[in-house]
Structures are given as structure tokens and as C-alpha cells.
Image: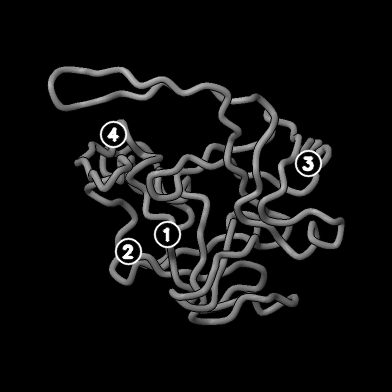
Amino acid sequence: MQALHDYIIENKKPFNEKFDAGNGVELYGDKRFLFAKLSNRVATVVNVPLIGETVLKVGYQVMIDPTIYYSQYYEKFGKGENGYLQDREKGLYKIEKSMIVLYRETFNDEWKGFGENLMVEFLRKKQEKTAVGLILETEKVEYVKGFGKIVYDNPTINKMGVSIGDTVAFKPEFGVSFYFGSKELFWLRNRDILAIANQN
């Protein structure tokens, strides 16, 4: 199977049963309420588009926008069809370029921004710990709105002098919250970056 403009990816397990709550703790979750945390965002490229050039190759791993799975879940309740799902048994999906966020060649390689995608970690303003019961401790964190540190960059933004570790100002209204293990990152595109923030 090969498409003209889209990628064919494989993911036989679109949802996990548990999510990483941080500090080595894993919790079971219900897909009805925790789509974002339970979505398995890592897939494997099975075929690249017939038309156009791409840095991706068959066998590369990709980090994708998990919304492609949502209609598949609702399908069970007769609430619509999943236009991305191509072969349920093989776990094959057909997705457009815009739904691929990061990529890497092998499991041991670092993730890289695909196209003009990048990820930032919110800057923390304040952090307070509160004891709940005898064992659990909750954390109240405030973030500096519109500022973050780049965690995953891309070659295009590197040419503009921006790279991993830089603190940037961005348009928060255009970013998307993205769970990456136990961390909540912010998925942006190059055009959302306004400036490199003053480090002094």
C-alpha cells in the first residue's frame, strides 16, 4: 500500500492501558477521559508518499498527532468512522505530513522536529507541594505564559539561530499541549516563535 501524498504508518496499539505519572509511578486510566495521556503517539513508517521528497524512510519511527485514533475509539459506539485507519488488523493508518510531529531513524536516536515542528517545555514560575493523605503529594505549578525552553528543534529554525535549550517567546494560542512520557510539552511550529528570550 502506497499513497500519492500521504504516509502509511503502523501502530497496532493506539491506546495504552497505563500512563506515566512521573517519579516512576504508572497509573491505569480510562480512555473515555484520558485520551491525551493514553494515546500511543509512536508509530513506524511503512511507506512514504509517491510524490515529493521526504527525509523520512521506511522503518523510521515517528511521533504523531494522536487525534487520528479518536474516531476509531468512538467507532465502537456507532459515532463515526475513522478516515485514517486503513487496515485494523495490521494497525495501518494513512496520514498527511502535517500530522507527523517528530521523527527518528532508530529507537536509540534523538527525536528531531519534522518539517517546521518543534517542542517546548513551559517555563515554571512557581511550584508548591501539598501533602494529600499519608502517601500522595500533589504539585501546584504555575507557568510563565508564552515562554518556554526548546526541547526538540528542527533544521529550519536552527538556520535562524534557534536551537535546543534556547528560551523563546511564542504565541500560546497556536500551540498544542502534547504529553511526552510524564512531561507535558507544547507543540509549536516555527511561525509561532516570536523571539529568543533575554537570558540575562
Which residue carries the number 1 mark? Answer: 85
Q: Nearer the viewer, mark 3 or mark 4?
A: 3
Q: Nearer the viewer, mark 3 or mark 1?
A: 3
Label 1: few (<14), some (14–19) or many (≥20) C-alpha neighbours in 10 Å:
many
Q: Are marks 3 and 1 in contact (CB under 8 Å)?
A: no
Q: Is residue 200 above or below residue 156?
A: above
Which residue carries the number 2 mark? Answer: 88
Element at badge 4?
loop
Q: Nearer the viewer, mark 2 or mark 4?
A: 4
Q: Earlier in the sequence, mark 3 or mark 1?
A: 1
What's the mark number on residue 193? 3
What's the mark number on residue 111? none
Amino acid type of disc 3?
A: Ile
Label 3: few (<14), some (14–19) or many (≥20) C-alpha neighbours in 10 Å:
some
Tell which of 177 and 195 is nearer to you. Answer: 195
The residue depicted at 72 percent of the width and 48 percent of the height is 166
Q: Are marks 2 and 1 in contact (CB under 8 Å)?
A: yes
Quarter of the image holding residue 86?
A: bottom left
Which residue carries the number 4 mark? Answer: 32
Real-space CA distance between mark 2 and mark 1, rounded to the nearest whole angstrom: 7 Å
The residue depicted at 26 percent of the width and 25 percent of the height is 137
Q: Are marks 2 and 4 in contact (CB under 8 Å)?
A: no
